[in-house]
Amino acid sequence: MSRDDVFKAIDVADSAALKETLENDPSLAAARSNDGLSAILFTLYIGKPELAEILLAFEPELDIFDLSALGGAAQISHILATNDKAVHEYSGDGFSALHLACYFGHADVAQLLLENGAEIDKTAMNGSDLRPLQSAVASCHLDVVKVLLKFDPDINIKMLGGFTPLMSATALGDEEMIELLISHGADQSLKANDGRMAADFAKLSGNK
């Protein structure tokens, strides 16, 4: 059994194969891909939390990125107590801990990271130009966005393609998010690289 067996079982959502692999070699619960992506984080990215539970049962060592995605604020506090630079580091796929906390909807973790020096407008290092605010908006986590707004993010920040958080919110039809962003200065007149504005994304997605 090898690391590849772990990632293959996760990729095809074969819980039986994953359990068998880990029972043969429990250390593989901490397996990582060539770029450093943990098996835990991979399960969460593909929306298979039940597979994450299988991995967690074998007690793998979790880093700040795993914990930010899982919502482990208390454990993150312990990490930061001995390594305050961890908030500035990137995961194997180019995201900061704050990006992950925002995307997976952990407002308490986002607050903790920001209070410990995480950069509110930190750019993902994977070519996407994603910022934490965009990660939270894209996954419709209003409570996380409210936390971020307390730390004065650039409300009109653009990701790859020139898309703003407001454009994402309108494309998703998230009315509460749209109202919140506009109330904090989101500019409806900005254009993406292809010339579309927020209202155009709403029309294309069928949202009034």
Image (tube, grey):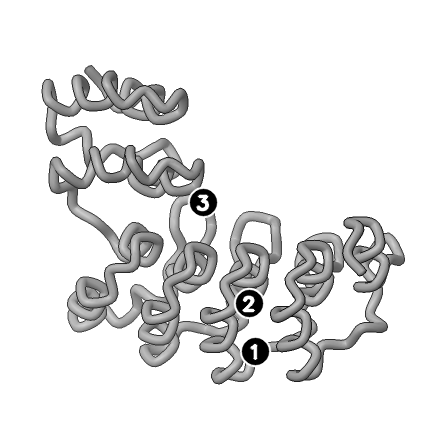
Disc number at residue 133?
Answer: 2
Quadrant of the image containing the N terminus? top left
Disc number at residue 93?
Answer: 3
Quick check: 93 above or below 72? Answer: above
- Helix, strand or loop for disc 1: loop
Percent position of residue 134, x then y: 58, 62
Mark 2 or mark 1: which comes first in sequence? 2
Report which quarter residue 20 is drawn in: top left
Instruction: Identify the residue at image location x=38%, y=60%.
Output: 97
Residue at the disc numbered 1: 153
Instruction: Identify the residue at image location x=51%, y=71%.
Output: 145
- Per the model, the C-alpha gap separating discs 2 and 1 is 7 Å
- Per the model, the C-alpha gap separating discs 3 and 1 is 23 Å
- Per the model, the C-alpha gap separating discs 3 and 2 is 18 Å
- Helix, strand or loop for disc 3: loop
Instruction: Identify the residue at image location x=21%, y=49%.
Output: 62
Mark 3 or mark 2: which comes first in sequence? 3
Side (left or right) of 168 relative to 200 = left
Side (left or right) of 37 relative to 203 = left
